[in-house]
Image (spheres, grey):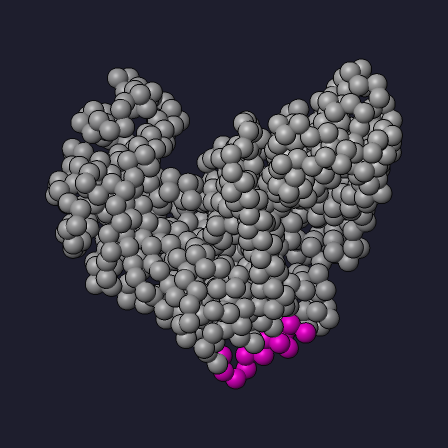
Amino acid sequence: MAQPAGGNLASSALDHRAAMAAAGANVGNLLGAIRSAGPLPDLGGALRRLENAADEIQKLVSEPVRLALIGRYSSGKSRLIGTLLGNPALLPSEWDPTTGNVTVLRLHACDAVTATRRGTQVHFLSQEDLTRCITSMARSIAAMLHDLGAPAGLDPAGLQALDPTDVDALRGWLERAWRLNISPLRTRAAEFSRLLGAYESGRDLLGAAVAVDDAVLREVSAIKNREHVEEADDLPAPPVRPVRRGERLTARTAEAVFDLVDHIEITVDVPHGSWGAELLGDGGLIYDFPGAGNHETGMRDRYLARRDLREVTVSLVAIDAGLPHDHAPFQMIEDFYSGGQSGQNRRDHGRLACGTKADLITQDALRLGQTARPLTAAALESQAPQLAALVNQCRKAQPGGRSGETLLVSAYYHADPGEGYRLDHIADLLREDLPSYEGLAAALAALGADGGVARLREAIGAHVTAHGLALAAEAVGKQVAAAAVAAKDVANLLEKAAGSKKTSLKDKTGALELQRLAVKLRSDYGAVKQLVEEELCDLNRRPYGDGRTLVEITEAAVARTVTDWTEWEPLFSAVRGGVIVPEEAGDELAATTEPFRKRFLETYDDFDTVIDGIARDVLEAWRREQTDRMAEARTWIARAGVEHPELAKPLAMLAPYAELPWVAEIEPVTVHGDDSEPQERFPLREDYMLPWHIDAQFSQAKTKAAMRHQIHIRRIHRELTSALVDLAADRLADTLHATAGHVKAEFGRHGFPTLAELRAASKEEPASERRSPYADLIDLLRSYE
């Protein structure tokens, strides 16, 4: 049966798609009317601009939604994909096509009863992508050599200077690198050599797509573990087995060209009205990335992931509940955002994380029901450490350290969990005792209800709408505005060619100048208003001269404050001369972490000053940006006033929208935090890793033991700082969001004058009654908006 699409989210997705399709149809009809109007005068760049806007709208309308799943091997991604689409067995467990290659599921909405695989193709790298991949791998090896200190006779720049298609020259350089006998370098050289071997075997397959069946997929997925060859004396040279287009892939030929595979594409029929059809749409794509950026992920896989993440709408990180502390699943996204792609080639996208195989942590949850009431954050950490770790991992998916949704999915999905699986009861306890963990309570309740699938679908839907369809609709709106300007320019050219006297101002040139200026200024003013939240609220934006993000600035301020706490001195004074001497600290070395809790809460109370100062700096930087952005418009208004004195009144009406005087009066809106939140997020237990812990009760110790406890003290410092940074980042984000709302409200109070109002201000004269031969087309062009 087709699963429900998700109510309001599905409706919102359909509304966005319908609006974009209507915009595409409207501009298409406009171009059709122009082309069917018979011989036309030279319309120059105006018609080209209209055609370009129409092409961009069509491109945005046809752009598919892309959902990416990222996680370790065997983390349950394949079964999770099938369950989201309504068929847990969609991708059989006996083969795993994602191993070693990106797998893409292309959805096809039809009258199917359930999600079903219809066909599979293996796509090979194009010549262009292969060249870029080789260049990327060469850059990676050169960077490693630079870090190691380039040995004599092996210039890292020499590898990057080689022709990416010159296999012999590349392999010769790799052989010299191999003889250095550096293990990590040999690992990369062996991978590079395998790609070159695949290139020699599969030159004829570049850019090809080969249809395969399940048997071949099983053979391809069997190529998993590469033999460790780092101990060999010579660089291994894979055997060359030429494979031609049209030749059926077998285990032998697939292995020869395995590294040349771009991705595996599976067409999946999904029922009309199902979650996949309504949210992702016909043609929607689901990516299953191999590895997740850990040590198992090679240079080629990293290159393909970076390339494909540029186009992803929403990425979902799958965290194996059996490995809740594992950071590897986030490495691919962090690598992408920290420099894997240049800013102009990447786009931000929605990011979520969910704990898969969540059955593994149900015992943690059930222990909470047996814990003394009221539940505390410390009890959650001690009684349910795996569950607490998953909550923290889910937060990592959110930019700027903001608290993200906690999402948990069962390994058995819709299966009956059995007696004693009272997760709804645990959820109620959390809501009563720890309101700040509402996300976890909701996740546990959803896990007990249907394995967490419905809640995960809803979360993905919200992110797809916000980061995909809403942004696409916004981009379509901008192209519609550009098409409207071009359409009016075309109308003016047609009117001029026909000798029409239909002008509403005394001076026709001045009328055109005023209209163009008003349209351009309206667009600029709208852009400023539209980007207020994006520019003010992004904690990872770099508006300052030193290049730091707002999160980094906040972290530095908090770290300085924590370092200055006087509570550290008794701890460090107890570690002297490489020997721990707790008794020398006397009464100053307290036997409880209460002094740290008190100082933690005091520091949180002092956040208002720090947050307000940062918010003021952000707002001031934003003001300067808007002043610079509108400088060109102010120049145009001044020039038009000199050249067209008759436009003095309408230009005076436009001037404030280029100067934005009301922006200078706006002040930050400080948002005060919840007083209960810092109490719950204090990270230390009463005796957590402190020198007076039972393991440290001795007066003499070897230097190594002393250093170990000194490190424990520094770990306390790091955990306190991290918790305060999270609190400060949340407060700062809330303050900036509130300030952005105030700014947008101020913009809303200053409505832009209409063309009719501007014409009235210039004392327009009655228009001539003589109609242009293109009158109907001109009216159509002028009415387009």
Q: Position of residue 409 (x, y in %)?
A: 50, 67
Q: Position of residue 329 (x, y in %)?
A: 46, 51
Q: Is residue 746 magenta?
A: no
Residue 717 vs residue 272, the one in the foreground = 272
Left or right: 738 with respect to 707? right
Residue at (69%, 55%) from the top-left corner? Answer: 681
Name the residue furthest top.
642
Q: Position of residue 492 (x, y in %)?
A: 66, 31
- Residue 333 in view, yes or no: no
Where on the picture, by quarter, is residue 677? Answer: bottom right
Where on the picture, by quarter, is residue 9? Answer: bottom right
Residue at (58%, 33%) from the top-left corner? Answer: 577
Image quadrant containing the C terminus: top right
Left or right: 522 with respect to 472? right
Residue at (12%, 43%) from the top-left corner? Answer: 241
Q: Which residues are magenta?
A: 417-428
Q: Is residue 418 magenta?
A: yes
